[in-house]
Amino acid sequence: MDSQTIMGSSLDANGGPGVMEAKPKGSASLAAVVSAFVPTWVTGLIFVAIFVAIRRWYPNIYAPRTYMGTIPEKDRTPSSSRSYFSWVHTMRKVPDKFMLYHQSLDVYLYLRFLRTIIFICFVGCCITWPILMPVNATGGGTSTELDRIGVGNVRKKGHFYAHAIVAWVFFSFVMFTVARERLWLVGLRQAWTLSKPVAKSLSSRTVLFLSAPRDALEEGNMHRFFGDGAVRIWPVAKVEALESLVSSRKSKIEYLEAAEMSLIRRAYKEGRKRAKNTQPQDGTVDYEALPDTVKKSIRPTHKPKMSPLNLTVDSIEWLREKIKEEEAEIENARKSYEIGDTNGAAAVFVEFSTCAEAQRACQQVATSDLLALSPRFTGVKPSEVVWKNLTIHPARRISEEGTALAIVIATIVFWSIPSGFIGLVSNIGYLADNVEWLSFLRNLPKPVIGLLSGLLPPLATSYLSKLLPAIFRYIFKAFGSPTTTATELKVQRWYYVFQVTQVFLVTAVFSGAAAVSKELMERAKNPTSVPELLARQLPKASNFYLTYFIIQGTTSAADNLLNYSDLLSYLFYDYFFDRTPRQKFTRYTSMKGIAWGKLFPKFANFAIIAIAYSCIAPLVLGFALLGISLYYFSYRYNLLFVIQPKIDTKGQAYTLALQHLLTGVYIAELSLIGLFSLRRATGPSVIAAVLFLATVVYNALLNKYLAPLENFLPADLAALSERDGDEDGESAPLLSSAEEGLAQPESESHIQRLGRRAHVPSSVAQHVVDPLARFFEPRFSASYQAMRAWLREGDGISGAFDDDDDSDVPEYSEDQLRSAYLNPALTSPTPLAWLARDPAGASAREVAELEGFGLRASDRGAWLDNKGRVRWAVEDLVEEVPVWKQEVKY
């Protein structure tokens, strides 16, 4: 039937306006879903098969956490062998909790976030499918295929009571789950922060204050500004010229290594060539035996950019001289370094005696000067600091933050142009019927139309959305963000806005609007039928996300396992570009990081879409459940075997992600209110409106009471941590005395008490009653005391975790403490020149010359093989590699 054939405005059985009897040919259907499903599953299976086949041959790409020397042995993932399927056994035996102790808090919480979304989708399927699918299918409409089990097929007003009641049940469950997780996270973060290894680390006892006045940079004023608990300060002022010199010196060392390796490689080849005539015992001619003319001809040369006569110089000698000149300039700059009048464009790191003192200092007002010593940050590690952004004037910082936000918002707004185009493509069949210049698309085979409408839009949406986090990250760093963690949290907040507005709302609106645009023009003469048309057609945009979840959960999850981009990049650079031992070492040992600001919003949006469509198109919940489960598997593998996080938000990213989930509830409730109003279903409209108001009140109260606990450490727990050194302090209960205004917590929840009184068998209590009690009564299971006991249980692999054990408490030398939070430009030495040893002895000669010139050099741990290729001591990194140093855990 042609899309122009429309039934007139007639009354349905409930007296409502008539609806369109024919479905536009461009609407998403089962064929489009299958068209996306088949190729993505085939592609995913191929990716997994390739991964299994090649994994054992490239352990530095697929399993570095099992053996890499840069990771302490106690933190490596246990692995019995490198056989094809040994990783499956490890995945089955090692729990997620293992990563809490041996990676970071964020790693564990990210996997928990995925499990929480899977749990919400599973419960949603259990609630909505048995009720809403039959209700929708028998709703009296004429929709076919997947549209039949959506709300667009409901014409009987009475059926909408089912949607309203199910919304109350499911959305209440979602809100309870979010509240429960936030309470659980508060308890975990408190227990984790106050465990000895964390609480006694330097970063936990240090606070970064920005916009520091000149007096606050003086050690004599330390107690005046920061209290008696302050024990050390590291002032930060501008050293731009020195930073430039240090950066230039580092680059020249790398150029020097490349030039030296070019000489060594040429000497080796020349020696091999001459050895064919003399045939020495070791197969090559000694470097010293080469003629002077040959030695000179094989030395690398270049023309310096600033050479007045454009002369060609010996690269090695020129670089040595320039490095020594810059060394002298750096030394003079350091000796003459003084902090002058900063006018507020400075910062100061302050070490406190305890974690509790640091928390108190972070919360108090340190000075009456406007904007001074603010903002402030705790738990900042030296590796996270963006040094150039610490010395920005307060007024300029505010200006730059506003500029960054304006640019980010403009980027999100104008991104709707390509996103809207993708939405139009998803309805390309209907556009071909109704847009004259696209009529040629009618001649395409149906499978091609299915691919264009079902596969191409989700792929394009996925690719476009990948670009934004890097853009946002660059913007925030360029405009004053002081640490990489603060930058990542800003990226998370705004990438979430982008995901919801562009990946979800804009795409959904355009996807649906394209299908009904012409009908809106036709119905302009009869406006009373327009709301019915919108209510019927807009829910069909949900089918776009069925294919979106399929693609994300199959191809993208399999791509996470295969990780072909990192593999090809490693092989390409290792073979064609890496010519020095340092380059080889860095390429091999650089482990893949993870961007929390990119991943949390992406999967929060997955959950938002699933929740928003839960009562409109319940099938979306099932596809989301499948897609996110596959993602969970792939990320679990990567976090166990591959990834080494470089950013630690200490649980803040998970807190934000949980707050973002409620956006799905708001969108769903507003959609239902609009749908019921358009269908003139008064009773369901009232029920949905009351639910919306209840959600607003719930969200406001939850944020009001949890925000202080999520942002700061409570005073009673801070006092407890200060007693850690006392003989009885650690054995004292958390809420130890009435004098502190606290009461001893109950050890048994109400559900457990009811189970005991009902004489429930112990096996049933263990597997049914206890899990129910833990979930529904977080007041007992998620308190600080309960979470501390949970942490002490360990992971079942590496033994129990004793948060009082001093063996894991970091110890620092005086030199490490003195330079911990100083700008590296003030302390970093000239890097060692690392060369590869060769049989001809050229490397030994060059090392001796470099050391004679006053530069540190070594050819230990690297060598040339018989083909002249650089090799290094992969198996003995700690003992043999001279440029590797054990990272200090601040």
Image (tube, rainbow, N blue to C red):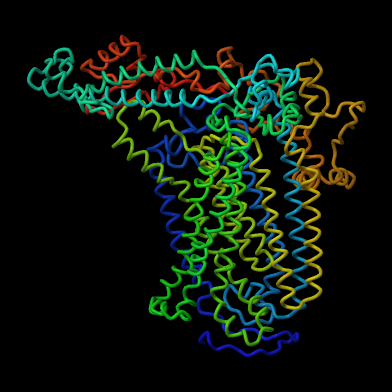
- Identify which residue, 626 or 462, lies in the foreground: 462
- Identify which residue, 605 or 39, lies in the foreground: 605
- Can you say whether 558 is above or below 712 in the image? below
Disc tally is: 0
Can residue 220 be seen at all in this image of the molecule? Answer: yes
Q: Residue at x 48, y 22 (%)?
A: 825
Q: Residue at x 22, y 18 (%)?
A: 839
Q: Position of residue 168 (x, y in %)?
A: 78, 62
Q: Position of residue 470 (x, y in %)?
A: 50, 45
Q: Residue furthest right?
A: 738
Q: Quadrant of residue 221?
A: top right
Q: Position of residue 720 (x, y in %)?
A: 80, 24
- Can you say whether 530 is above or below 765 in the image? below
Can residue 95 be seen at all in this image of the molecule? Answer: no
Q: Residue furthest left?
A: 277
Residue 621 horizontal side relative to residue 729, left or right:
left
Q: Position of residue 138 (x, y in %)?
A: 69, 78
Give the quarter of the figure containing the C terminus.
top right
- Identify which residue, 523 or 631, lies in the foreground: 523
Q: Quadrant of residue 446?
A: bottom left
- Can you say whether 759 is above or below 301 in the image? below
